[in-house]
Image (cartoon, rainbow, N blue to C red):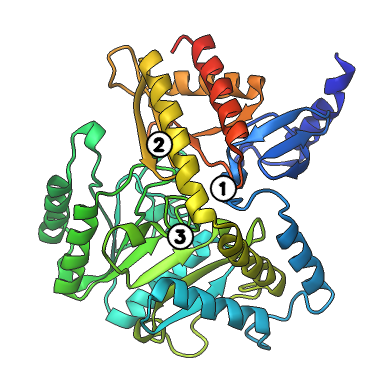
Amino acid sequence: MNSAAKATERLLGYREQGVPRGIITAHPVVVARAQGSEVWDVDGRRYLDFVGGIGVLNVGHNHPRVVEAVRRQVGEISHASFQVMAYEPYLELASRLNTLIGDGEAYKTLLLTSGAEAVENAIKIARAHTKRPGVIAFRGGFHGRTLLGVTLTGFAQPYKQNFGPFPGDIYHAPYPDAFRGVDSQQALAGLREVFATQVSPDQVAAILIEPVQGDGGFRPAPVEFLQGLRALCDQHGIVLIADEIQTGFGRTGSLFAFQQTGIQPDLVTVAKSLAGGLPLSGVVGRAAIMDAPLPGGLGGTYGGNALACAAALAVLDIFDEEDLVARGVTLGEQLRSGLLDLQRRHPRIGEVRGRGFMLAVEMVGADGRSPDAALAQQVIEGARQAGLLVIKCGVERNVIRFLAPLVTTEAQLAEALQMFGQALAQAGA
């Protein structure tokens, strides 16, 4: 055995012995330190990290402003539980999110811990407001790993497995996918069919949608589809929930993806890059809807933890001072151009898609259409061997996604594209 690989092998052995197989680790890498868009493993090998803790690190690993904010906060108060005592970082963060999302309207914010927790509370709030039970989500959507989260998620494996029975009054409608021949009008017709055959609209509390599907394959919802949803929700008194957990905080070319579509959601769920790596999520929504649950109906011991709130305030400052939204637009253009160039040279890339710096490639068979999950995995492994970390997504697990930090340099992005091209060539794509 190469002595340089001993630390990794030893630690992965502990993982095999002590961690259940149900939680996968996408790469056989044990990270030791990280900075910006780079990580180094316990054996000293450097990688470009284009996973970012699965889209959590839009400001990069260990941004100095985040590190300093957490250090300062831990010396004052690290945890109190907002249900017991209020503290300034929670109140300031709620105010800033209300302004950023509400756009002049009266909005309120509930802070929580995980994305799935935010989704579940958004459903509770919508049901309390409407006094209705039904919730419609979309095929290919992903909304978390809790029992309600996997019920809302619009594909079976690996998330649903044998975990049922699942909560009731959850329905799924088609999501637009131009590559698979489903346009906005067909998807809206599918939703109306759900109204006609499964649940009448007067029994629907909420429609939950990712403006760009994340784990479902980086499929952007067309503007006309989202505007059609907004009109249907207005017509039937349904709460429209935008799940911005992966799309939020500059990932798609605006601070939030819905801001490019001409609609205003009633509720927005946020998490992932909100706090630069610390666990924090939230539901941000119209004040009258957010106030529907009675006192005591919302909460959570760690929700809006003071350290995470301090980190989130630093993240928002970084976005302002470093103009990261514009930075994401520039990087997105460079990445899209590079991926399209690779597609021209590698016909097994069926489609390059996404929005802003949230981009992916769909790997297909020789027919140019059928999903090829094995090829996608082969390319991912080749990219890691070259020094680039990426992961897969999509209902068929044949899509390779790129979630690099917005602080990635142009040189690092060019290096990543070179590594990815090398992996494609080695896989015969």
Q: Which residue is mark 2?
A: 394
Q: Nearer the viewer, residue 79 or 212?
A: 212
Q: Is residue 146 above or below residue 34?
A: below
| Location of residue 167 with respect to 30 vertically, above or below | below
Tell me where residue 220 appears, x and y as whole percent. Answer: 32, 46
Q: Nearer the viewer, residue 195 or 211?
A: 211
Q: Nearer the N terminus, badge 2 or badge 1?
A: 2
Question: Could you classify mark 3 by the number of other residues whose Cα lies within 10 Å: few (under 14), some (14-19), or many (20 or more)?
Answer: many
Q: Is residue 66 left or right of residue 361?
A: right
Question: 11 or 168, which is in the foreground?
Answer: 11
Label 2 close to label 3 by CB (< 8 Å): no
For the question of whether residue 296 can be seen, the reply is yes
Query: Where residue 406 is drawn, which disc sits there?
Result: 1
Q: What SS does tag 3 mark?
A: loop
Q: Pinpoint residue 405: horizontal percent, then vertical percent.
A: 59, 45
Q: Residues within 10 Å of mark 1 (few under 14, many from 20)?
A: many
The residue sitting at 70% across, 74% down in the picture is 306
Q: Amino acid at mark 1?
A: Leu
Mark 2 or mark 3, earlier in chain: 3
The quadrant holding residue 358 is top left
- The residue singled out by tag 3 in the image is 255
Q: Is residue 92 above or below residue 49?
A: below
Q: CA distance from mark 2 to mark 3?
A: 24 Å
Q: Amino acid at mark 3?
A: Leu
